[in-house]
Amino acid sequence: MTQETLALHYGYNKESFGAMAVPLYQTTAYDFGTAEHAANLFSLKELGPIYTRLNNPTTDVLEARLTALEDGEASIATASGQSAIFFAIANLAEAGDNIIIAKKIYGGTTTLLSHTIKRFGIKAKVFDSDNADDLESLIDANTKAIYFESLSNPQIAIANVEKIATIANKYNIVSICDNTVATPILFQPFSYGVDVVVHSASKYISGQGLAIGGAIIERKGLNEKLINNPRYEQFNEPDESYHGLVYATLPFPIFTLRVRLSLVRDIGATISPFNAWLLIQGLETLSIRIKEHSKNAYLVAKYLSSHPKVKKVSYPALEGDPNNPRAKAYFKDGMTSGLLSFEVEDFETAVNVLNNTKIFAIVVNIGDSKSIITHPASTTHQQLSQLELEKAGISKGLIRLSIGLENAQDLIDDLENALK
Ligand SMILES: *Cc1c(COP(=O)(O)O)cnc(C)c1O
């Protein structure tokens, strides 16, 4: 089945009165019926709802659909994109280990992976995901993950996914791709050999800026990479917190299962069933929306690229953009979402543009149906040092746009006015 159909039907069999809409199971806990069933659930002889911190029937449908759209094996939804990223890393690395992260990533991910995780004894080394020439030289025996974004926010660059995945496979290291901006409709990392996909579902998956959520999806066959892999003892040795359970012996996809049974169980950043339900509504129209976002953004990018006050436009779908060949090779019909950025002369000019647009809202979000304008240097990336800003390719005059579903000409007229 194709993604359009999966997004509407997969993982739900109308068990409650034939309800057409996926029911919202707004419940904390579940009646096990018998003591035996309860015991089987806890010993993993059967998988099923135990307590909503661990799983929930509404969230199950969201997870099934995300897995299907990414053509993966299994997934777990989480409270936010940030928690998905934290869990994916914490599932692989412990104190004394290191991870290798791309230079061009989301500001929140930089602070999480470069600073917060350091306090837990996990060190991040930085590589250049544009070409990945430096990646191999950074790997050592304690490297536990390679982390990058397929289409990076806010730099709007497309990673050399194939090369990154090939190197990760050569060293038997798990690669993690944040596919938030691309969405599985435009790009599927697993088809290029990536192991784990993470999402901020708060963006295009939600689509209307209604809910925070995240997800981790594992590829088909990831168990084989983890089982008997000396880098990942945690999957091959008894888990003392789970009566000596050895994940490698279980007949399930163990990456996301361990996130659920160990990390989400203990840390508790679970998605609320209501947010999962909202995100299911978002997924139903994702394939249509992302194409319209891309069409609109292309027209705006084309307009900006010929504006005298605009120094540079980054939009991979645009002819002449350094990422255009990769957009054409990797992305569905060369479409690259509603995210674009452009550079004006300086800080003041950027601030003026922000203050003079009428349709664009000054909001630190992307993927909303309503257009958004952001100045990363003063907001999302404010906590980064000057050196980190330069490394991440963010100048003081950089403006990021998340193009919504308004009429493209109205957006162009609004920018024309603001740039006067
Ligand atoms: C927003 C975002 C995140 C963080 O997700 P939240 O849902 O806001 O926690 C991570 N990665 C990317 C690329 C994002 O755009």
Image: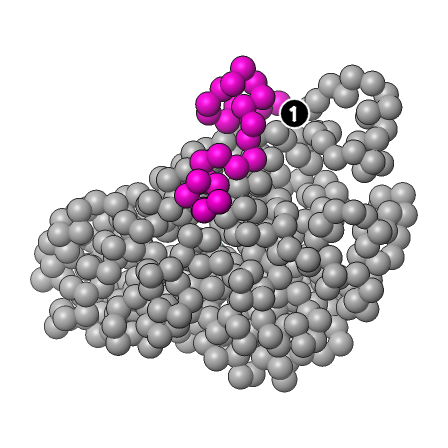
- Write down the region rendered in magenta: 1-28
Coloration mode: one colour
From the top left corner, tell me how far across and down residue 10 is, in percent: 52, 37
- From the viewer's perspective, tell me whether residue 332 is left or right of residue 276: left
Q: Is residue 16 magenta?
A: yes
State the residue position of label 1: 28
Residue at the image point whose x is 81% and y is 54% from the top = 248
Residue, x 56% and y 56% (percent of image)? Answer: 197
In the rendered structure, which amino acid carries the disc numbered 1?
Thr
Q: Tell me if I can see residue 333 in this picture.
A: yes
Instruction: Give the quadrant of the C terminus.
Output: bottom left
Query: Is any part of residue 100 visible from this angle?
Result: no
Q: Residues within 10 Å of mark 1 (few under 14, many from 20)?
A: some
Q: Main secondary structure of the magenta part?
A: loop
In the rendered image, residue 163 lying in the magenta stretch gets the answer no
Q: In the picture shown, does residue 13 fall above or below 241?
A: above
Residue plotted at (45% across, 33% down): 278
Locate residue 321, reporting x and y percent: 29, 74
Q: Locate residue 319 relative to residue 83 in the image: left or right.
A: left
Q: Is residue 68 left or right of residue 49?
A: left
